[in-house]
Image (cartoon, rainbow, N blue to C red):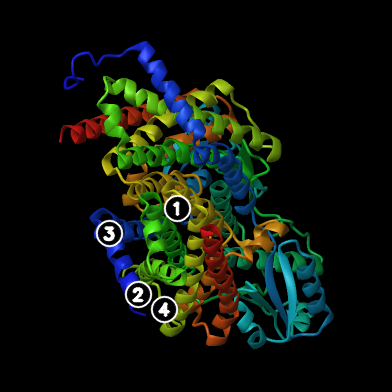
Amino acid sequence: MNRLRAMIVKEIWAALRDPKARVILIAPALMQLFIFSYATTLDVTNVDIGVLDRSGGIHARELVARIDGSPTFRTIRRLDSAEALRTAINDQQVIAALVIDPDFDRRIDTRQPATVGVVLDGRKSNAAQIVSGYISRIVGEMGAELAPPAMAGQAGGTVVTHWYNPALNYIWFTLPSLIALITMIGAVAVTSQSIARERELGTFDQLMVSPLRIHEIVIGKMVPPFLVSLFNGTMFLILAQIMFGVPFSGSLVLFYIGLTVYTLTLIGVGLFVSALCSTQQQAFLGSFVISTPLIMLSGYASPIENMPGWMQVLTYADPVRYFLVIVQGVFLKGMSAWAVFGQLWPLVIIAIVTLGGSAWLFRARME
Amino acid sequence: MSSTAPGKTFDGRRFRALVMKEFIQVARDPSTFLIAFLLPPFLLFLLGYSVSLDASRVRVALVLEDTSVQAMSLATTFARSSYFDVTPARNVAAVRDVLVSGKERGIIVIPQGFGEGVKRGNPPPIQVITDGSQPNTANFLGAYADGVRSGWLAEEMGGASDPTIGGASEPPIGVSNRFWFNPALRSRYFLVPGSIAIVMTMIGTLLTALVIAREWERGTMEAIMATPISMVEFVGSKVLPYFLLGLSSMAICTILALIFFHVPFRGSVLALLAISAAFLMPALGMGLFISAATKNQFVASQIALLSAFLPTFLLSGFLYEIASMPWPIQAITYIVPARYLIPSLQTVFLAGDLWGLILPNIAIMLGFGVGFFYLAFRVTKRTLDQ
């Protein structure tokens, strides 16, 4: 027990000794939080749009004014020819351009159906689709006001209620998810680097010939990443609420139980990487090669149900997948202990596999 | 090079020898091989298959509170729709738990008296409950459920049905969309150029920073500096192998993208090479600068990840629209070299050689390159003078 305590104290000192490394434990996580949370929105706002108005009539001007008034669009660029439109789209000065035909006003005045052409930049196909949706809605509203038709489809209607996040605030989704992603990046990197560094400097051999048992070394190595992970998780938990106004409706105890088990699986992954690597460079590469698929398969960047079937199967091995559900659940859905448990047991299995596997690998490599 | 000792000038023979030495060193390092030749395809396939922003089936539970023929017919329409993956449920309370665990993304409720209402020509509204913790899916679900309902109703009531979502019959003003360069709206088409940018950042900045930081850490850097090698020869020989590695992994990605993802290539190879070479300048300069400034592999790798890899991913306009970000973040994107790379690459692949867009971007990237190399020179010299 004394030996273990000495090992833990040594590890904490080693992690905090170098001032540069000390900053690196916390600062990147904070920066990631801010950049991620503000940058990763799939909303489209403030885009520039072009208008080629060949009609010049009152209805055409009305349509342009409506688009100008929408918060989605920042500036409206007047284009005077098809050539100007081509240049504006090609050079990405605008993401889309409206083409209003010369007979637009006449057709509306004579109650004939009129058409607005929209040219969109397919190089950004996702943003372009969203912009196209906004334009259709604005045009549709204007049309409905001009000639309210008896629309069979509109009778009755649909009442849509968004549970847990009534205003569909995107940042309510982003921030809880980031707790899962950023603690993962940090925990895997810190774990894998600390052993690789000792290997490269030769001090790992000294540890091995010391009276320390192998499990004591491994437990000692687990402590710093565990503390860093809990510290970052707590900091994000507080920042999400006070800086970004994300409500926390669930139980703190469940949050910390989830975070603890999750961190253990990540440390297992990090140990696994470091057991395979003998230099820091390899460890860095290893943790990168592992972290990227863990993020991509978690369901954060793109919903799991959109992936091909074989890839959906792979996501079951991804610890981030389960913790994402837990952290979103305890933040927004007031998740019950039973529901948390449903996500927790796969994490426990992954933790046993990764921790057990890496302990076995260490022993195997020693002999 | 005012501070260099006499005799430290550029010498072709010495430079060749140095470059040879660096090439051998790079070729002998297994992790370089891994990064340059295995990682690019790995990332390309991972991104190409896992990120799909194209909407697909959403899992919903369907609660039928009405057992009339009309309610059944609407339920069948939902089940057959290509937007939904429908599971029947008894009532809303029974589905609450699966919504919490994320097994279902929403609940559609067809209310009591729906069939009666349809007969009278005045059906009650159907109810859609979504999982708001996934805002994109929630939005999609609300809009498409309404689309399916109004399409069904229009047909049921014998009106002229309109296939557009949420559409009314015969709108007074229609919209005709034309998506240039990517009419089928495949999101893979813009993901692939993006992954090439990420791969080149990895090699240019991450690998360079890591390898050179290791030399600083081990002291072999000082040993080289003590020899009669000029700064230009030294930096040139360090950077050249990674420059070529960057270009070759770009080529690997391009070929794989054309073969496996059928991404069109409408520009010229020359333009692609020019753009990539221009981007590698700031990428390599940054890698050199980070390694010289930190001299520690762990710190260098974390800084490279933070200042090069993540910005290329998030702040380059590759996945997320720059115009939609708050202005301080938008301001940061201007100093991210990948911001100028992504539109150029997308253009070369999807639109062709539009030099009006490509040339200014190349010029800006080269400008950043000069800036980073200048910084790298300064930091290296200063630290040696100490």
Disc 2 designates what residue? A3
Helix, strand or loop for disc 3: helix
Q: Earlier in the sequence, mark 4 or mark 3?
A: 3
Task: Answer yes or no: are tags 1 and 4 on the same subunit.
Answer: yes
Q: CA distance from mark 3 to mark 1?
A: 38 Å
Amino acid at circle 2? Arg
Whole-percent x and y of residue B119?
80, 79
Q: Nearer the viewer, residue A124 or B7?
A: B7
Task: Answer yes or no: are tags 3 and 1 on the same subunit.
Answer: yes
Q: CA distance from mark 1 to mark 2?
A: 59 Å
Q: Earlier in the sequence, mark 1 or mark 2?
A: 2
Disc 3 designates what residue? A22
Chain under disc 4? A
Q: Earlier in the sequence, mark 3 or mark 2?
A: 2
> Any mark on residue A248, and which?
4
Q: Residues within 10 Å of mark 2 (few under 14, many from 20)?
A: some
Chain under disc 2? A
Helix, strand or loop for disc 4: loop
Q: Quadrant of the C terminus of chain B?
A: top left
Whole-percent x and y of residue A120?
57, 41
Judged by depth in the image, the label closer to the viewer, 1 or 4, is: 4
Amino acid at circle 4? Phe
Amino acid at circle 1? Thr
Judged by depth in the image, the label closer to the viewer, 3 or 1, is: 3
Chain under disc 1? A
Chain under disc 3? A
Q: In this picture, is B52 found above or below B289?
A: below
Q: Quadrant of the N terminus of chain B?
A: top left
Q: In this picture, is B2 found above or below B35?
A: above
Q: Earlier in the sequence, mark 4 or mark 2?
A: 2
Q: How many marks on residues? A: 4
